[in-house]
Image (tube, rainbow, N blue to C red):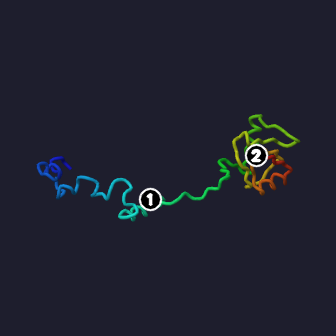
């Protein structure tokens, strides 16, 4: 829209610029207060719709919880073994292929898939099914 057709150009000389009495557009009364004012009163429906977690406490967080950031499945150990073998970085310990998941920044070993070789796996934590699958093929799990 061209500037010459806008409302504020037409009302340049008027005292209230089309907002009625002088106080109607001057301060924060027209918007129901400044900031978070009125969220428990006249802006309650806005708060329910757009900020439902504004009031209230945080959810319960256990004091000693451990957050698992990186994990790996038993089936992925086979791919990891192949990669280490290609790069000539595979070591043996007790006639088993050593895979140190702590050095590779993995936190937990999960039990999806099957292991092809007997691995000697060093890991921070593991599931019961992962332990069963590693031991089924003759492998060992060491917790560090």
| Residue 51 on image: x %, y % | 44, 59
Query: Which percent across, then down, holds residue 134?
Result: 81, 51
Q: Which mark is residue 59?
A: none
Q: Where residue 82 sits in the image (x, y, percent)?
A: 75, 42
- Tell me what residue is drawn at x 78 percent, y 57 percent: 128
Q: How many marks?
A: 2
Q: Secondary structure at mark 2?
A: strand
Drawn side of residue 61 relative to residue 95, left or right:
left
Task: State whether residue 92 is above or below residue 23.
Answer: above
Q: Which residue in the rendered view is the most extreme toward the left? A: 13
Q: Quadrant of residue 19?
A: bottom left
Which residue lies under the disc numbered 1?
Answer: 51
* Residue labelled with disc 2: 123
Q: Residue at x 88, y 41 (%)?
A: 94
The Cα–Cα distance between marks 1 and 2, rounded to whole angstroms, is: 42 Å
Query: Looking at the picture, how far across and down is residue 86, in whole percent?
Result: 75, 37
Q: Quadrant of the C terminus?
A: top right
> As rendered, which of 144 and 95 lies closer to the eye?
144
**Residue at the extreme right:** 94
């Amino acid at each position: 829209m061209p500037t010459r057709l806008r409302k504020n150009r037409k009302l340049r000389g008027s005292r209230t610029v089309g907002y009625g009495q002088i106080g109607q557009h001057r301060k924060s009364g027209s918007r129901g207060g400044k900031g978070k004012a009125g969220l428990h009163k006249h802006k309650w429906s806005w708060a329910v719709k757009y900020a439902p977690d504004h009031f209230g406490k945080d959810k319960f967080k256990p004091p000693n919880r451990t957050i698992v950031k990186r994990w790996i499945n038993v089936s992925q150990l086979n791919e990891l073994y192949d990669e280490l073998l290609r790069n000539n970085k595979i070591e043996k310990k007790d006639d088993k292929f050593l895979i140190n998941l702590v050095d590779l920044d993995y936190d937990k070993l999960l039990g999806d898939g099957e292991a092809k070789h007997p691995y000697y796996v060093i890991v921070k934590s593991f599931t019961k099914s992962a332990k069963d699958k590693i031991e089924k093929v003759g492998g060992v799990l060491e917790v560090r």
